[in-house]
Image (cartoon, rainbow, N blue to C red):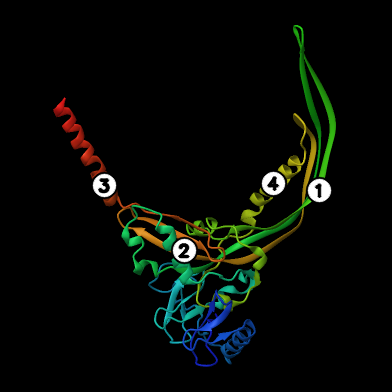
């Protein structure tokens, strides 16, 4: 399985995608390169990686005899081992990781073999917010929160914020809708001891087409799916055709949920929205009685894409619970769950309750 690292043509340093310039930057000589250069480098690396005779590829899975497929001996099931092209160290990760870092030489590594065939993304939404800006957004967000454990926002923890591409299914379609109904107008009045009601019935019909573009569903079944769903939506008009270079310098996950798992839910959601849209165009009636309606979905299209998220997680050892912060890597929208420092809450209670208790005692004494 191919493992790719992008090296600077000028100095050999590692190249990473820079969200600010939307180019690829060398971490050492600070040179910038366009996508065309990265495409050529990627092709060159793949050509060099082609074996001349049957042999294990650098970066291929290396299960030992007797272990489960894709597993590394001594590791948890599902762990996979690769070889870093830069330093030769072994990289152990899970079977759904597609981009990560070598823990020895710290070079970004793209596990290109995990994105082949059916797992090759159609598109990617590149990061538009860099790490410094993500940290700034986090600090602004956390400054408004009180009674959070200090371990959650100490500098060492904040620096661990990670840029991750999460896999998503994007659903598009066209809905042809038609609705026929009776629109009722009621008029009431009183004459003497009698109350009269006049009902006027009108024939009402509405029809139209609705274009649905890129409804997003997170394609991970893990608990980390909250990190994506909480920062939706994205500006989908900025999607780019997938290039592995966009992953350089970031982490990435491969999907573990297929589009069939969302199909029924999405169709129901789209049809409900289309029906509501048709009904909203009918006004001026006191009551609407629908006689018939049809909502036909056509031209369905699915895209498999990667969405950018800055993430920071914290496990509270006392409660054994995971808390998280997530920031949309394009728009900056944030969401998160925060732990509560019970010690600081207890101290606050003491500050407030102590004087109040003494005041009550003094009042009782004076009485």
Q: Are marks 3 and 1 in contact (CB under 8 Å)?
A: no
Q: Is residue 13 positioned above or below 260 on the image?
A: below
**Residue under pointer 2:** 137
* Residue occupied by mark 4: 273
Residue 40: percent from left, percent from top:
63, 87
Residue beneath disc 1:
208
Q: Mark 3 or mark 4, which is nearer to you?
A: 3
Is residue 20 depicted above or below 303 in this figure? below
Q: In the rendered view, does 149 fall on the left or right side of 333?
A: left
Residue 293: image location, x then y, percent: 79, 40
The 10 Å Cα crowd at callout 4, few under 14, some 14 to 19, many 20 or more, is: few
Q: Nearer the viewer, residue 321 or 274?
A: 274
Instruction: For mark 2, give the secondary structure.
Output: helix
Check the picture and name the quadrant holding the N terminus: bottom right
What secondary structure is marked by label 4?
Answer: helix
Above-or-below relation of 340 to 359: below
Residue 254 figure quarter: bottom right
Across and down, in percent, residue 48 comes to 58, 91
Q: Earlier in the sequence, mark 1 or mark 4?
A: 1
| Marks 3/4: CA–CA distance | 48 Å
Q: Along the polypeptide, which appears first: circle 1 or circle 2?
A: 2
Tag in front: 2 or 3? 2
Mark drawn on residue 346: 3
Sooner in the amino-acid sequence: mark 2 or mark 3: 2
């Amino acid at each position: 399985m191919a493992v790719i690292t992008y090296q600077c043509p000028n100095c050999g340093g590692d190249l990473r995608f820079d969200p600010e310039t939307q180019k690829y930057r060398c971490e050492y000589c600070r040179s910038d390169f366009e996508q065309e250069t990265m495409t050529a480098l990627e092709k060159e690396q793949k050509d060099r990686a082609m074996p001349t005779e049957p042999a294990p590829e650098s970066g291929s899975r290396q299960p030992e005899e007797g272990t489960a497929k894709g597993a590394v001996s001594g590791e948890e099931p599902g762990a996979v081992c690769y070889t870093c092209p830069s330093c030769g160290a072994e990289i152990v990760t899970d079977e759904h990781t597609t981009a990560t870092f070598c823990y020895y030489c710290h070079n970004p590594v793209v596990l290109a073999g995990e994105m082949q065939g059916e797992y090759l993304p159609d598109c990617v939404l590149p990061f538009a917010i860099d790490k410094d800006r993500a940290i700034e957004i986090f600090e602004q967000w956390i400054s408004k929160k009180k009674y959070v454990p200090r371990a959650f926002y100490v500098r060492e923890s904040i620096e661990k914020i990670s840029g991750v591409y999460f896999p998503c299914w994007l659903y598009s379609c066209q809905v042809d809708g038609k609705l026929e109904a009776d629109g009722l107008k009621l008029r009431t009045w009183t004459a003497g001891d009698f109350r009269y009601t006049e009902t006027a019935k009108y024939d009402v019909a509405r029809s139209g087409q609705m274009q649905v573009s890129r409804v997003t569903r997170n394609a991970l079944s893990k608990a980390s799916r909250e990190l994506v769903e909480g920062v939706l939506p994205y500006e989908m008009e900025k999607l780019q055709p997938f290039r592995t270079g966009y992953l350089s310098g970031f982490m990435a996950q491969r999907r573990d949920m297929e589009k069939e798992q969302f199909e029924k839910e999405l169709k129901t959601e789209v049809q409900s929205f289309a029906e509501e849209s048709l009904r909203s165009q009918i006004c001026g009636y006191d009551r609407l009685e629908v006689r018939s309606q049809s909502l036909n979905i056509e031209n369905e299209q699915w895209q498999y894409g990667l969405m950018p998220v800055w993430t920071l997680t914290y496990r509270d050892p006392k409660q054994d619970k995971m808390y998280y912060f997530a920031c949309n890597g394009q728009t900056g929208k944030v969401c998160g769950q925060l732990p509560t420092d019970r010690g600081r809450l207890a101290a606050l209670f003491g500050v407030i309750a102590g004087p109040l208790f003494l005041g009550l005692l003094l009042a009782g004494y004076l009485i």
